[in-house]
Image (cartoon, grey):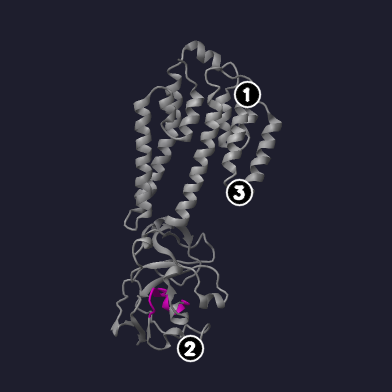
Amino acid sequence: MSKEPWLAVNLSKIFPGLGQIYSGQKNQGYFLIFIYIALYITALCSIVSSKGNLIIGVGLLVTLGFVWLWNLFDAYSAAKSKNTREFEDLRQQSKDPWLAMFLSQLFLGIGHFYIGKWLFGIFAVILIIVFSGISQFLSPIIYAVISYLAYVFSPVHRQRSKNWALIIAILIAVSDLLFISTGFSLRKYVMEARWIPSGAMEPTLHGSPNQWEADKILVDKLSYRFEDPKRGDIVVFSPTEALQKEGYQDAFIKRIVGLPGEKVELKNGQVYINNQPLPENKYLSSNQRTVIDVCTSGIQPPYLAKPVTIPPASYLALGDNRNSSYDGRCWGVVPRELIVGKVSKRFYPFNRIGNLE
């Protein structure tokens, strides 16, 4: 039985291996599905896990892209190899409706331009731009409808495969919605990318008001669902009540130095925990002194003007740039529920990519 090469490509674009299964190469299709899922899970674990290797994770994602791209060519070739010369000659005599459907997924209304429906192609471009601005969840549905209409408006429909058009359109919408939902869930519950806007964490993290000059980091939002923050963790947290009163709205990035129930005080330019000096030579430069002289604004006297005991479910967080960091010395502790996550990796600049300690 003849197979539609561009129908196979449409299927493999939705998920690698589906086009090969449609073309009759089931073992190859199932193998591709397995390899793609395995690579995706391994890449995600390498990137998300605080112990994972970011370079390996990114490398696997790049490999995943190449696998996906190769899979499209292979799906086309697998389907074409099943066809007779007569069917191929017939297929090439007119605009291919499955190619029109594929092109419509790549860029706005290009599938309609391909079949000569210029006015509807322009309308499709406008429609997608308008609805994309309203909600990102509407875009997959619009793309699916426009792709389906690219098939419908094509001059030729071969009887054996025309029933696939609606199925493909539904799969396009469902797969794209799942992709968007997965990305949203990962950002909200697993990991989020941020950049460092200030120099309060120098030299560990380079900050700048220009995000293209600043370090870019990944914030692990998952780990603290299973464990408590630890001393030494670099964390992102929402402004505390004291900071909100001062007008702060953006998240802060600091290092945890004091844990719940501990007595903290500043003596001789050092942090003391339960009457013992805290060793911080791993992340503080030798000329850094931890004093309250930086606390020229905010509540007075500063929070660490005298020894304090950290309340339950709260943490003392300080910047690594002690000479220029507006931190817990000045305004107090961070409640557990305000901690967004742990900074686990730096992904930019590329020469400093890797895990953070």
Give the residue displayed 51% in from the left and 15% down from the top.
88
Does the residue at mark 2 contact the one at mark 1 (Cβ under 8 Å)?
Answer: no
Mark nearer the viewer, 2 or 3: 3
Task: Say which residue label 2 marks.
Answer: 301
Indicate whether residue 217 is drawn in magenta. Answer: no
Indicate whether residue 313 is drawn in magenta. Answer: yes
Q: Is residue 333 above or below residue 165?
A: below
Q: Is residue 37 above or below residue 2?
A: below
Does the residue at mark 2 contact the one at mark 3 (Cβ under 8 Å)?
Answer: no
Q: Position of residue 95 (x, y in %)?
A: 60, 21
Q: Quadrant of residue 275?
A: bottom left
Give the residue displayed 56% in from the left and 77% down from the top.
245
Q: Position of residue 351 (x, y in %)?
A: 40, 57
Q: Which badge, 1 or 3, is on the more N-terminal residue?
A: 3
Task: Say which residue label 3 marks.
Answer: 135
Give the residue displayed 41% in from the left and 26% down from the top.
21
Task: Say which residue label 1 marks.
Answer: 154
- Direction front: furthest residue: 312
Question: Mark 3 belongs to which amino acid?
Answer: Ser
Give the distance between the C-alpha atoms of the residues marked 2 and 1, in whole angstroms. Answer: 76 Å
Question: Mark 2 belongs to which amino acid?
Answer: Pro
Q: What is the span of residues highlighted in magenta in the rendered image? A: 310-326
Mark 2: few, some, or many residues within 10 Å (few <14, many ≥20)?
some
- Direction left: furthest residue: 276
Mark 3: few, some, or many residues within 10 Å (few <14, many ≥20)?
few
- Residue 32 as seen in the image, left or right of residue 3: left
- Name the foreground residue: 61 vs 150: 150
Q: Is residue 314 above or below residue 66?
A: below
Question: Mark 1 belongs to which amino acid?
Answer: Ser
Helix, strand or loop status at disc 3: loop
- Name the foreground residue: 57 vs 230: 230
